[in-house]
Image (tube, rainbow, N blue to C red):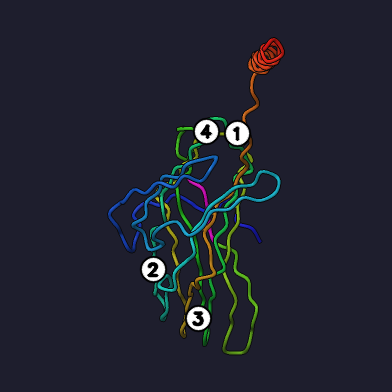
Amino acid sequence: MNVKHLFVGLAGLVGVAANASAATADLGTFTLDYDDSTILGGLSFSFSSGGNVVGFGWNLPSSLGVAGGAGSTQTFVLPSFTVTAKAGNTLSGPASSFLGNLVFGEYSGATTSASGSAMVSFDGGPAVAAGGALAKTVTSSLPTFSGGYFSGTAESPIASFVTFAVTNASLTLSIDGPGFGSILAQPQNELKFSFLSTPVPLPAAVWLLASALGAMGTITRRRV
């Protein structure tokens, strides 16, 4: 099951707060300005693949998690960032996000849940709240134990954009019911974003000028 949006804006966040620290990464066709002071730290990876797909992300540290009985909750601040297209390139959707796979264990009747949060804005427009609960996949079920993982994916159908900003991002992990539960990240778990990047076509007038200059160069060389 996919989450309609990976993040939702929340007021009154509970959890770890950090002083914002700006970092910048030049990722070829776009730049990424982000907060590297969260539990995720510096950018972990960037990528490009067929069909002009580009993206970036963070590996989730093992310190991101929660364990205990009913009422155990942890909220982790995730990186705020702004993507900006570099000159000569255009960015477009679908803008996709993925968070997962966080492993959970539920013992003696405990229940676990995970949800994300953020505000999203394109091209300096109003920040929009989006998000919800991450999908819960059960891979093991016994009389006194249930286990599996949480993950969330989302896509925005926006046609094209110059900037893409995410702010006030967080991840909340909770345990309820009797018994004992846990939700734990592993280094191979990821928070990543992807979209399309294509070169901006040169106007016809520029192509004509380039052709004319090329022709003049050819004529000049022949005269020499």
Whole-number angstrom distance, CA of label 2 to CA of label 3: 16 Å
- In the image, which is nearer the foreground, mark 3 or mark 1? 1
List x then y, in percent, for residue 218. 70, 16
Compared across the picture, whether 185 is left or right of 149 comes to left
Kindly identify the amino acid type of the residue bearing the numbered disc 3.
Ala
Whole-number angstrom distance, CA of label 2 to CA of label 4: 34 Å
- Residue assigned mark 2: 74
Q: Is 129 covered by the magenta stretch?
A: yes
- Residue assigned mark 1: 160
Q: Is 99 covered by the magenta stretch?
A: no
Q: Give the residues drawn in magenta, as a range.
A: 128-133
Residue shown at the point (48%, 37%) measured from the top left: 84
Residue shown at the point (37%, 49%) measured from the top left: 23
Identify the secondary structure beneath mark 1. Answer: strand
Few, some or many residues within 10 Å of mark 2 (<14, 14–19, 20+)? some
- Residue assigned mark 4: 162
